[in-house]
Amino acid sequence: MIKTRVTVWNEYLHEREDENIAKIYPEGIHTAIAKGIENDDFTVRTATMDQFEHGLTEEVLKETDVLIWWGHKGHDQVTDDIVARVHQRVLQGMGLIVLHSGHFSKIFKRLMGTSCDLRWREAGEKERLWVVDPAHPIAENIGLFFELEEEEMYGEHFDIPQPDDLVFVSWFEGGEVFRSGCTYHRGQGKIFYFRPGHEAYPTYYNEQVLRVISNAVRWAVPKHGAMPIYGFNEPLEPIKPKQDHGEEQPQG
Amino acid sequence: MIKTRVTVWNEYLHEREDENIAKIYPEGIHTAIAKGIENDDFTVRTATMDQFEHGLTEEVLKETDVLIWWGHKGHDQVTDDIVARVHQRVLQGMGLIVLHSGHFSKIFKRLMGTSCDLRWREAGEKERLWVVDPAHPIAENIGLFFELEEEEMYGEHFDIPQPDDLVFVSWFEGGEVFRSGCTYHRGQGKIFYFRPGHEAYPTYYNEQVLRVISNAVRWAVPKHGAMPIYGFNEPLEPIKPKQDHGEEQPQG
Amino acid sequence: MIKTRVTVWNEYLHEREDENIAKIYPEGIHTAIAKGIENDDFTVRTATMDQFEHGLTEEVLKETDVLIWWGHKGHDQVTDDIVARVHQRVLQGMGLIVLHSGHFSKIFKRLMGTSCDLRWREAGEKERLWVVDPAHPIAENIGLFFELEEEEMYGEHFDIPQPDDLVFVSWFEGGEVFRSGCTYHRGQGKIFYFRPGHEAYPTYYNEQVLRVISNAVRWAVPKHGAMPIYGFNEPLEPIKPKQDHGEEQPQG
Amino acid sequence: MIKTRVTVWNEYLHEREDENIAKIYPEGIHTAIAKGIENDDFTVRTATMDQFEHGLTEEVLKETDVLIWWGHKGHDQVTDDIVARVHQRVLQGMGLIVLHSGHFSKIFKRLMGTSCDLRWREAGEKERLWVVDPAHPIAENIGLFFELEEEEMYGEHFDIPQPDDLVFVSWFEGGEVFRSGCTYHRGQGKIFYFRPGHEAYPTYYNEQVLRVISNAVRWAVPKHGAMPIYGFNEPLEPIKPKQDHGEEQPQG
């Protein structure tokens, strides 16, 4: 059995700068997620922004099947070179799971091509995530819905491309809705955006949240398809020389 | 009756550097398109790369409902500032029609988020464009298919996001297929990619090609929707203070 | 100027059997909608179930560009013949707008291919409809959202095919969400499902609701595309006789 | 390891009525497919139209994770009861793979809601299937394209709903294109339509065709999501009694 190699990336700033956050995630959000999704099918490692090349060296990415991304206040500190490298790897097949405030990360904005902007509010309100595509593997073993007692609110309009599959829609206590589970194919890679996970709440200990992330990892594993070949190519069929440019052309 | 304001942008290089191309498009591709789509509903102007700010000043873009883009060998000469300006305008509602080799333009790649790469061959072969979405307004008054006696070949895999609507698929004499008419919503803007139009062939005098472009202009006109408001917002409904973080949460 | 010919169909049962409903819609829901969307671009007529062939004769349908459908308790009384006729017309290009409890009509279920089931509750609760696709013509001149003070609740999972475009998502006071504005292309026809409109509330007098329906009529107008031709057809290109079935085939 | 239970259904008429077909598929198309996709992960059985309840009893369907369907001249002989039973099972999660002329089967038309009509020609021509979504699991280990030396032609327009994912597009020697690999989610079930497989050619011995079908089986396996619960449901949040129906409503 070949294990799926997962790398959980975290900017790892809030947890070291704010003692309230540190209490919730004493070893960082990345460690909470890595431990939370551990199982016999996955080999999970972590990487953080302060490491050499943000912990995302060529070698690490080459050995990563699925990359999980959490960032917020440090988006601008991620160098463009590393973003380009991750972008390239996604188009070549690496799965990418972007969490919560990662909607504004350089890598997500680059892959989406839009502003990725949204409405937000931090008021400790209830979020209820409804499954709108029960056939989707990312919703496996999730009930009709699940709840998070306290979360930051993200509201529509969320400026993203229409998802290939919309898996979850969130209801917020304060009156908003949000497309909170969105899948995309880009090149040979698969991308899943998942909304929950504000640093001030213990969201990444929630069993349902961890199950969704685990399901998404399984869904995003590269499928070893053929690498597309681009550029010039010879004809596969004979091409008839054209002589009379003015000839009549049949129309449907 | 309010007219739709169209700007046809062309890098305008081939036609001035190669006499064979100049014979086909003596006033440039932009002029051929502008004249070809002229009608009572449109006000059409042109812009070229060599103009001040590539002819795409703030004012020009403000007065443009739909921008048509043709570029090929000069993609890199388009400055990032102007690309960012056009990108912003598209997200705010301006329609964008990207033609042929514009698939590799900075603006298209930025909006798509992928490599936009493809396979190609210049062999003067036949292209037949089939309508696969006959309900789509861009296919209005187009038959079941139409043909171009000689065109450059573009073949799959075409590295783009799955289109919101796939309107045309091309058959090529040399054995390839291509998704040659693709629509996208991005922010408040609408984008249409349309494959035909190699500079060495008189494609932009073809009646069906011009009809597709005209249809696309009509489809892409901004719809004066509300400008989304992003950022912080106050709750629309009362939020109950949470006291006991450990309370049981119902699950579906 | 060619006017769009709209037919508003209503089973017209509640309004004649329940005096509370009659107070809200004394001339029937169909009349309220017909008057509400009247404008210089539309010619609007109505049809009801008790008429000859439910008011949907061959002639009426032939003269209808867009059909609006409201039904609830009388779904089973609509004959299969008329359903087949409407189905056929939609595939041939007639627009169809299905309102509220029409989700369970024979025609909608036939076009969707799914159960079209959902969760519901009638508790006079608040519904807030959020625009999730601000580029869509059906959202034209609608704000970021609009509210209905009292409506029946429809909740996910809504058993429909993934919409081609998802325009609105509803928030409900009681805790649910719903994909409440969904577009589909089927054959040459366009379909829009729009959630609001329980008979016990004055929803079809709401200005925003009427604007959405009017926008949808404009969007759904048939585009006079070519009628696809199906069945046998002669080759458009020469086919080489095959002699050796065992020959090697190139693979990508 | 839990095996995927596959049932290959065939009307099994051509092979018993035409000796040329019998030479290609002496034990029937169903047997060729069943043997061709056999592997350690699957338990494969077959069913044919002439069996009791077409071989699709409640028990058989209950024990089927993925159903493969081949039919052509006997579509009308399949009883509506069995079609309704299969339809119900698909919405409840059973995978369905519809092959070739199955596009006109009752079950496919019911699930699609359209005519499923197309253009066709039987001329022993070459078909080349191009991968247009290399990230899709159904394209796993398929090259950039693969060829079938002789096949029946199916051409656009193919009257189906826009696929959730378009995986393959076919090129035909005679000049047509076709969306030949299409996925759909319907209810909790997954559906894959795959074009190749005319009875007069040995298509179901082709290694690439068998690989696509095997990939599709793996993709279509039910994911044991929660069975959606429909109908009335109690509010999850308190609903405030409304008193003044005339009060002002905020608009976005």
Image: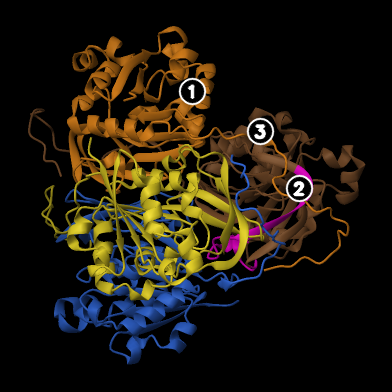
Chain colours: A brown, B orange, C yellow, D blue
Residue B153 image offset from top left, x and y in percent: 28, 35
Three-letter code for the amino acid on which mark 2 is drawn: Thr
Q: Residue at x 80, y 35 (%)?
A: A50
CA separation in Å, label 3 and label 2: 16 Å
Mark 1 and mark 2 in contact? Answer it, CB < 8 Å: no
Residue B62 image offset from top left, x and y in percent: 46, 18
Q: Disc 1 is attached to a residue of which chain?
A: B
Please tell me how crowded label 3 is: few (under 14), some (14-19), or many (20+) other residues with Cα within 10 Å.
some
Please tell me how crowded label 2 is: few (under 14), some (14-19), or many (20+) other residues with Cα within 10 Å.
some
Three-letter code for the amino acid on which mark 1 is drawn: Val
Which residue is identified by label 1?
B86
Q: Residue at x 31, y 68 (%)?
A: C49
Q: Which residues are magenta?
A: A122-143
- What secondary structure is found at the residue carrying circle 1? helix
Q: Would residue A78 appear left or right of D173 to someone viewing this image? A: right
Query: Vertically, is D74 above or below A181?
Result: below
Q: Would residue A170 appear left or right of B178 to someone viewing this image? A: right
Q: Disc 3 is attached to a residue of which chain?
A: A
- What secondary structure is found at the residue carrying circle 2? strand
| Residue B251, numbered circle | none
Q: Disc 2 is attached to a residue of which chain?
A: A
Kindly tell me whether residue B10 is visible in this rendering.
yes
| Residue A46, numbered circle | 2
First of labels 3, 2 by sequence position: 2
CA separation in Å, label 3 and label 1: 26 Å
Given residues D141 and D80, the one toward you in this image is D80
Labels 1, 2: one chain: no
The stretch drawn in magenta includes residue A123: yes
Could you tell me which quadrant the N terminus of chain A lies in? bottom right
Is label 3 or label 1 in front?
A: 1
CA separation in Å, label 1 and label 2: 38 Å
Which residue is identified by label 3?
A82
